[in-house]
Amino acid sequence: MKLINIRSTRDYELQCVIEIMSSFLNKDLTEIKILEIGSGTGAQAKLLKDLGFKITAIDISDSNYSNNRVFDIVNYNGKDIPFPDECFDVVFSSNVLEHIVDIEKFQFEMQRVLNKNGYAIHVLPSGSWRFWTNLSYYLAIVKRAAISIFSKKKQSPGLSSSSDYKKRSKRRIFQRLLPARHGEKGNVFSEIYHFSKWSWIREFSNCNWKIVKISKNHLFYTGHALLGGMVTIKTREVLSKFFGSSCNIFILKK
């Protein structure tokens, strides 16, 4: 059942989620009440609404995407979901849970608003994504260094000899030795474990979720820093068979 004209990795991902909902919920899809957590711009929520779903979207007011919203998103404090008990059939998030500091408490909040026959569907980064993203970061540094060395761009006269400039340059080099941490736990290397399927299984099991199914998104995200937008969705599908999927999709029941 293909409902989406797939133009991006997020479209592809959302199509996977819709197929999961259709296989697990014995309802007309347009009758399913969905809560999306951490909606960002609201692009996925808007697409779900356009397809006929009953979608409610929430995000923190100071989100990085708050000025670019394309959907009516409810602001909340990032801790307490502002809805009554058991009012949604599906609680959905996409690459969000890894950014929540008190993840244990928040999982009980999600269980509270989910009805007894409902499902939580979470798209989460995988350990393989973190590994290949770390590796590509250093390859991208080599690429930039090579471009810098062979470019004909000239420095401002006298700038390279100043002590302040040298100090700033050394500081920038040191800061760039490590890629940025993605989530709220550990560092870029320990995230390889924290984002693994087994780590998420333990996290969900500790909060009394029943893990119904774990799927892959069958896409390889890494490579933009090296290749820009040249990698097509089809190519990413093929690459995921060799290098692993960048996200796992967890289907849970309380």
Image: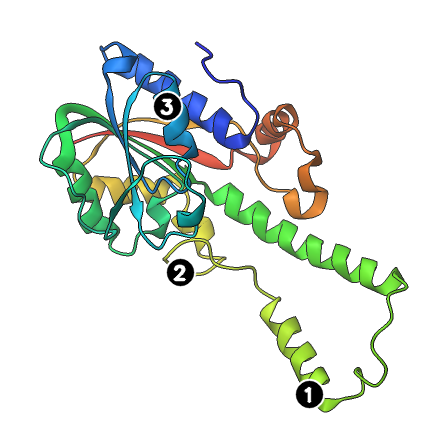
Residue at (83% x, 74% y) in the render:
155
- Which of the 4 quarters of the picture holds residue 43? top left
Which residue has dot 2 on it? Answer: 186
Q: Is residue 35 above or below residue 174?
A: above
Horizontal and vertical percent for residue 146?
82, 59
Residue at (67% x, 84% y) in the render:
167
Q: Is residue 187 visible?
A: yes
Residue at (23% x, 26% y) in the render:
119
Horizontal side of 217 relative to 206 (left or right) equals right
Mark toward the start of the polypeptide (3 vs 2) = 3
Horizontal and vertical percent for residue 15?
44, 21
**Residue toward you, 247 or 9:** 9
**Residue toward you, 248 or 8:** 8
**Residue toward you, 3 or 238:** 3
Horizontal and vertical percent for residue 104?
21, 49
Give the label, 3 or 2, closer to the camera: 3
Helix, strand or loop status at disc 1: helix
Residue type at mark 2: give it.
Gly
Task: Work out which residue is located at the far left of the displayed protein and give it.
Answer: 85
Q: How many other residues sit within 10 Å of disc 3, few (<14), some (14-19) or many (≥20)? A: many
Which residue has dot 3 on it? Answer: 48
Residue type at mark 3: give it.
Leu
Q: How many other residues sit within 10 Å of disc 2, few (<14), some (14-19) or many (≥20)? A: few
Helix, strand or loop status at disc 3: helix
Horizontal side of 80 relative to 244 (left or right) equals left
In the rendered structure, are the residues bearing label 1 and label 3 in contact, judged by CB atoms less than 8 Å apart?
Answer: no
Q: CA distance from mark 1 to mark 2?
A: 33 Å
Which residue has dot 1 on it? Answer: 164
Q: CA distance from mark 3 to mark 2?
A: 34 Å
Q: Is residue 89 above or below residue 153?
A: above
Residue type at mark 1: give it.
Asp
**Residue toward you, 37 or 134:** 37
